Image: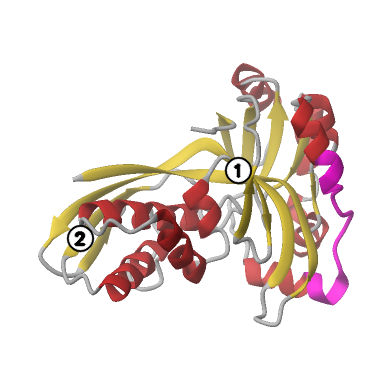
Amino acid sequence: MYEIFARAKINLTLDITGLRSDGYHEVEMIMQTVGLSDRLVFEPHHKGIFITCDTPGLPLGPENLIYKAAILLQEYTGQEKGAIINLVKNIPLAAGLAGGSSDAAAALKGLNKLWGLNLHFSELLSLGERIGADVPFCLTGGTVLARGKGEMLSPLKPLPAFGVILVKPPFGVSTGRVYQQYDLTGGGARPDTGEMLKAMENKNLSDISSLLSNVLEETTAYLYPQVGFLRQALIGAGATGAAMSGSGPAFFGLCEDEVKADFVSWNLNLPPGWLKIVTSLENG
């Protein structure tokens, strides 16, 4: 039996620089893992892949990225053994926090160990890319500059354990729909990735916070007007800076530490049913 924690991510920057011939968008983004995580427990089984989870609305069959990762690993290696995978879900669904991708990355790692496959990390990265654009980052974790469709990863120096307050409305967002709308109308302000990298080198929270930017934020707010107030609400409650993560609808606020993030959470007035989670940047 093996246990792995699958960590959520946020985007300190997210820029779209073009459209690829394979249909993916060309991106440039700075990605960062946070302490919030799902928990996966792997047990051997003589045959078949079985996923258990008590989260309502989560598909546990072929649509699940854990299941896809397991089947892909079996096909790649010829492995005939099965597994029972128990998922404790803490990362909100369809939030822009890479919960599904992180679970898939954890499945690749956990099953590689459970089945004694001894695959090289580069092989797991290649398999991860076939599952989803965020999976290679979720295998790597930490602080990373991602390019291409998200698979070209350049690790960066870790940031301090700044506090993070995550906010998730009681609905999910279709990443495909957000990108389709972006293609039709264009996005909002684009991040200055170069300046953000300089600010991160200096580990200056104020400068980093002022440069938080996501080119999809305006598009998601157009499709889901309910989230349009979140950036200013987080800053108004005391966050040093705020932005949307991924294609949303989750937003995050940065603070000097987790104690301040808890203070922001306390001050933040949200509609009923909206989720607030206090965590911190995670580089381990």
Whether residue 160 is visible, yes or no, is yes
Whether residue 92 is visible, yes or no, is no
- Residue positioned 19% across, 70% down in the render: 48
- What residue occupies the far bottom of the structure in this picture? 21
**Residue density around tag 2, few if under 14, some if 14–19, many if 20 or more, within 10 Å:** many
Residue 195 shown in magenta: yes
Mark 1: secondary structure: loop
Residue bearing the label numbered 2: 83
Residue 159 vs 177, above or below: the answer is above
Residue 48 as seen in the image, left or right of residue 144:
left
- Residue 166 position, x and y percent, is 62, 38
- What residue occupies the far top of the structure in this picture? 259
Residue 3 as seen in the image, left or right of residue 21:
left
Residue 147 vs 87, above or below: the answer is below
- Residue 266 position, x and y percent, is 64, 23
Please tell me in which quadrant of the rendered image residue 162 appears: top right
Q: In this view of the protein, which residue sits in the foreground, 231 or 279?
A: 279
Q: In this view of the protein, which residue sits in the foreground, 210 or 128?
A: 128
Residue 81 as seen in the image, left or right of residue 188:
left
**Residue density around tag 1, few if under 14, some if 14–19, many if 20 or more, within 10 Å:** few
Magenta region: 182-196
Q: Amino acid at mark 1?
A: Trp
- Residue positioned 55% across, 37% down in the render: 34
- What residue occupies the far right of the structure in this picture? 189
Residue bearing the label numbered 1: 274
- Judging from the image, the colouring scheme is secondary structure
Residue 119 shown in magenta: no
Q: Quadrant of the N terminus?
A: top left
Residue 71 as seen in the image, left or right of residue 264:
left
- Residue 8 position, x and y percent, is 52, 45
- Residue positioned 83% across, 57% down in the render: 218
Residue 177 vs 6, above or below: the answer is below
